[in-house]
Image (cartoon, rainbow, N blue to C red):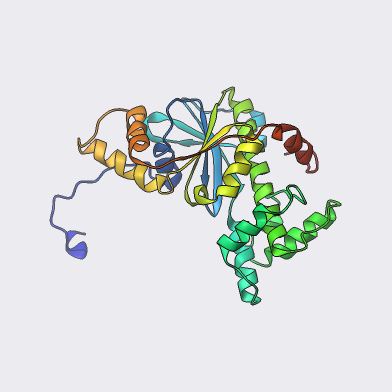
């Protein structure tokens, strides 16, 4: 192996949070243990950090998993569809010769009235590649809603629906694990999406702290640094280092949004 890589031995080998989400959760800049997290990218992983697994029938039925984290923690989480819906929509529009500039579409979506239409992001029809705007329109029609009539409306439908999915997943994670959270940390590329972050704060009724974008890389490096003696301490100390070195954007839930989100949630089947 040394000959193949051109390295000279001995080469130190460090066991980190080997799944990227495990490293990303290390990189969550949480100040207490009362937090939920969303690792937001093409897919979203939504959950809480626990000292022990939740091994109940309702937990299994709700699609939650218990995954090993750093320092013996358990990442109690559920996979939620992420920005795949948006990226596939952009690809479809670009292939059709339509405008597909993400910044411009997000600005236009922010001007669209909220809740024009919402869909269940986890509907299996959204999993394969393809014409996502057409699938969204079809599902809206099936559920008695007026389908989006423009690209901006489609983007707003996606973001409202994702925030609603995060709301449901955070609430279910806390209920099934018996935990209480006071903040939602969003890490990964989706943390840059300011409209989605504000909608997530509104939907969850909780402060959202967005960033760092590269939490997985930071968590990986921090565990390596600790193993080599460059830093010390447990997860609390590692996260304090993230807080002191990384930019995090704060979003507060807007007053009166809970009633509106509860009403919109009622449009969708229970999950």
Name the residue nearer the viewer: 244 or 82. Answer: 244
Q: Residue at x 25, y 40 (%)?
A: 225
So how many labels did they put on this image? 0
Name the residue nearer the viewer: 201 or 112. Answer: 112
Give the quadrant of the N terminus. Answer: bottom left
x, y percent for residue 237: 32, 29
x, y percent for residue 43: 55, 51
Position of residue 129 relative to residue 230, above or below, is below
Q: Is residue 79 left or right of residue 141?
A: left
Q: Is residue 99 left or right of residue 148?
A: left
Name the residue nearer the viewer: 231 or 205. Answer: 205
Q: Is residue 41 left or right of residue 62?
A: left
x, y percent for residue 268: 78, 43
Snapshot quadrant of residue 156: bottom right
* Residue placed furthest toward the bottom: 97
Position of residue 110 relative to residue 269, above or below, is below
Q: Residue at x 60, y 47 (%)?
A: 196
Give the quadrant of the C terminus. Answer: top right
* Residue placed furthest toward the right: 144
Q: Residue at x 44, y 36 (%)?
A: 68
Snapshot quadrant of residue 45: top right
Position of residue 18 relative to residue 233, above or below, is below
Snapshot quadrant of residue 89: bottom right
Q: Is residue 186 left or right of residue 214?
A: right
């Amino acid at each position: 192996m040394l000959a193949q890589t051109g390295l000279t031995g001995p080469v130190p080998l460090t066991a980190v949070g080997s799944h990227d989400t495990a490293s990303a959760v290390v990189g969550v800049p949480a100040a207490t243990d009362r937090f939920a997290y969303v690792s937001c990218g093409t897919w979203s992983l939504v959950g809480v950090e626990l000292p022990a697994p939740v091994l109940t029938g309702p937990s299994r039925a709700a699609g939650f998993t218990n995954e090993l984290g750093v320092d013996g923690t358990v990442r109690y989480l559920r996979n939620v569809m992420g920005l795949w819906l948006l990226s596939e929509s952009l690809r479809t529009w670009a292939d059709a010769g339509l405008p597909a500039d993400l910044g411009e579409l997000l600005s236009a979506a922010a001007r669209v009235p909220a809740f024009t239409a919402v869909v269940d992001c986890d509907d299996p029809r959204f999993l394969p590649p393809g014409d996502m705007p057409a699938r969204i329109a079809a599902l809206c029609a099936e559920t008695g809603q007026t389908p989006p009539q423009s690209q901006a409306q489609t983007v707003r439908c996606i973001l409202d629906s994702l925030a609603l999915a995060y709301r449901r997943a955070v609430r279910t994670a806390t209920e099934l694990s018996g935990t209480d959270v006071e903040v939602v940390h969003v890490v990964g590329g989706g943390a840059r999406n300011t409209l989605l972050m504000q909608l997530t704060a509104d939907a969850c009724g909780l402060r959202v702290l967005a960033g760092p974008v590269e939490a997985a890389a930071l968590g990986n490096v921090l565990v390596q640094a600790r193993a080599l003696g460059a830093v010390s301490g447990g997860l609390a100390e590692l996260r304090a280092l993230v807080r002191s070195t990384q930019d995090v954007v704060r979003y507060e839930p807007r007053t009166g949004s809970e009633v509106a989100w509860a009403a919109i949630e009622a449009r969708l089947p229970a999950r």
